[in-house]
Image: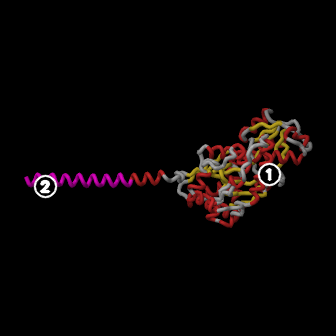
Amino acid sequence: MRGDCTSRSEERGAWYRCSSAFFHLFFWLFVSTAALSGQTALADPIRIGGVEYLGDLPTFIAERDGHFARHHADVEVIFSGSGRENLRRLRAGEIDFALMAMTPLVFDALANPVRDGPDSPVILANLSHARPVVHLMLLDVGDVPMDEALRGRTIGVPHGSNADYVLHVIARIAGISESDYSLLDIDPEEMGDALASGRIDAVSVWDPWAGQLRNRFGDRLKEQPDTGRYVSRWLLVTRRETAETDPGHTQDILRAYRDAVVWIQANPEAAFSAHAARISGANSTQRNGEVDLLFDVTLDWSLIASYQQQLVWALTDTRTNDREVPSFMDMVAPAPLAAIAPEAVTIPYIPKDSGRQDK
């Protein structure tokens, strides 16, 4: 009898110990799940959308030299053909950070003037200032003035891209308006065949795509760069939700870009040579030596001027003069950069409001 009681007691003790262990395991799983569900931190890998473009050299160097890996264990860089495509993918949640020029953001702001949503794109930093980077290339026009070369032509350009705005600038310099030529919205990779088939007579495009067209058509192309009259800025962009709820990862990405830019500034020839070697497989003749290019990681007043200039053009282009116009400060998130390099932020900034201007 005593043995039976002892056996039952041991069984009850074993059951209690197992139940207690299970309860504690369940409790900690519950706590961990609840904690994770309250976080909006980016999952691995962090996805960065770059562009095959000389102005995006910092992205290439940061990936090649391990700067992203040094600040975050798992980063995937996905290169596309344009900043316009990157913006689409950013809004769709396909990437977490995106590189682009100012122009796609201007059109996005006009299409989506309310900038408080979590998916609204915001500028984290300017990475480069470059000129000339976009080229107007006309096929079989001969040696005639630019105004004559453009009149009556069909020009292929990605609508809403930096090349679209540069074409406007070149045309205005030549003394003609958009009504003097036709536009066809076309992606850069389709331009060569479109020129060869006669669908278009000219293109406005950047390297390395311009280099591929030089190789294909040679002296048949009349080329007009934007000859220093326009400075293109290259921007690092994310969603508002990422900038405001995951500042740690956002700051890590900015630190990686700062490391890459420091190396580029110290080794410009090696950096340009590495980029040229990277795109040589695309049979490009990109003209690095002809580009006036400055790399930094900043948020300065020049961005505001660039936004305002392109906004005036975009309003006319889209014929939406009565549309609400977002403030530039609704499109920028200075807090992450200010946290790691306050001297790099010279635009109006109110830290307690996460970098957004009081309205």
Numbered badge on residue 95: none
Tell whether position 306 is magenta: no
What is the magenta range?
A: 1-28
Residue 9 pos. (x, y %) = 16, 54
Label 2 is placed on what type of residue? Answer: Thr
Residue 204 pos. (x, y %) = 79, 43
Relative side of 141 to 44, left or right: right
Q: Residue at 74% across / 54% down in the picture?
A: 233
Tell me the CA gap for discs 1 and 2: 88 Å
Tell whether position 16 is magenta: yes
The rendered magenta stretch, by its main secondary structure, is classed as helix
Relative side of 296 to 92, left or right: right
The quadrant of the image that shows the C terminus is bottom right
Residue found at the very far left of the displayed protein: 1
The secondary structure type at the circle numbered 2 is helix
Residue 27 visible within the image: yes
Q: Residues within 10 Å of mark 1 (few under 14, many from 20)?
A: few
Label 1 is placed on what type of residue? Answer: Gln
Q: Nearer the viewer, residue 17 or 136?
A: 17
The secondary structure type at the circle numbered 1 is helix
* Residue topped by disc 2: 6
Q: Residues within 10 Å of mark 2 (few under 14, many from 20)?
A: few
Residue found at the very far front of the displayed protein: 359
Relative side of 112 to 2, left or right: right
* Residue topped by disc 1: 309
